Image (spheres, helix red, strand yellow):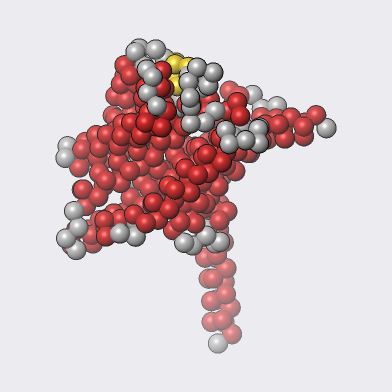
Amino acid sequence: MSFFVDLANSLPSALAQGLIWGIMAVGVFITYRILGVADLTVDGTLALGGAVCVTLIRAGCNAYLAVAVAIVAGLLAGLITGFLHTTCGIPVILAGILTQLALYSVNLRVMDRAANLSVSVDKYQLVLSARYVKMLSVQNPIPVVLLFLAVLIALLYWFFGTETGSALRATGCNINMAKSQGINANRNIVLGLMLSNGLVALSGALLSQFQGFADVNMGRGAIVIGLAAVIIGEVIFSKIFRNFALRLLAVVLGAVIYYLVIQVVLQLGLDTNDLKLLTALVVALFLTIPHLKEKITAKSRIKKEATQNAGN
């Protein structure tokens, strides 16, 4: 009985974290599914968003303005990765690794060489805080993050329906065809990377306020969690959610499901040191499911065709 009580007490926090990481997962979705690349910059960008946001709040800056500056910092990180890839000719995965590596030092400098900076809701006016996650009040972080997500999905749905957004999607679908239609593919790749990392930095800014601190290593493994959310959302909701906005929602739900599963497993007694292993297994499992479904479908189709040919 105590297991279910402890689980129920931990679910609001897991839900809030899942929604915050869902913003990051949407950023990963833009590069992984729309551009067709795995951008490893996000591990450093998540920590960059948190570092910039917490540093500015501690300096007396308004929390919402600090979040906005964190987003700009994320956009610049994406710009650097895009520059290294499109102008310097470095493969996008390696460009992301180089930017991520550089961001570790940048984040330390942003936080005045401290590996960890706290930001207490007792001292500062924050956008959201884990302290109120179980309260029925306007300070509860869950409605705040839901509002952020609603605005974010609406803006992205509008943007990817514009000429620029359609050109970006065309670049990801077939870069050679896009170039033949006069689309500036390099510009769109840079734009996609900037947009993705801006969202990741937004997630980092909100996460640092939610947990009450920014850490230079808080983004470690973020790309894996983002991919897990994307894959889980697609595997579970792909046949239900066809609309682009609903696909973005599916990614967010994937992040929520991931964190709820993690919370259940932790309550069952999993050692926290094994979380990365569990994450890798979850991602591998959900990546394997679509492949197995395709193989089963193909075998079923071949068998059906063979039966029809035999009957003829």
Q: Quadrant of the N terminus?
A: top right
Front position in the image: 87 or 13? 13
Q: Give x and y (percent) for residue 129.
A: 54, 28
Residue 103's place in the image compared with 288, above or below, is above
Q: Give x and y (percent) for residue 248.
A: 46, 51
Q: Which residue extends farthest bottom?
A: 312
Quarter of the figure with residue 11? top right
Judge from the rendering whether residue 56 lies leftward or rightward of residue 308; answer left or right.
left
Q: Which residue extends farthest right?
A: 1
Residue drawn at x 32%, y 25% as measured from the top left = 103
Q: Give x and y (percent) for residue 102.
A: 29, 24
Residue 153's place in the image compared with 122, above or below, is below
Q: Number of numbered discs present?
A: 0
Residue drawn at x 53%, y 21% as measured from the top left = 121
Q: Which residue extends farthest top?
A: 113
Front position in the image: 13 or 276? 13
**Residue 121 visible in image:** yes
Q: Give x and y (percent) for residue 253.
A: 55, 47
Residue drawn at x 19%, y 63% as measured from the top left = 181
Q: Quadrant of the C terminus?
A: bottom right
Residue drawn at x 50%, y 51% as measured from the top left = 249
Judge from the rendering whether residue 204 lies leftward or rightward of residue 236; answer left or right.
left
**Residue 268 visible in image:** no
Front position in the image: 21 or 155? 155
Front position in the image: 120 or 4? 120
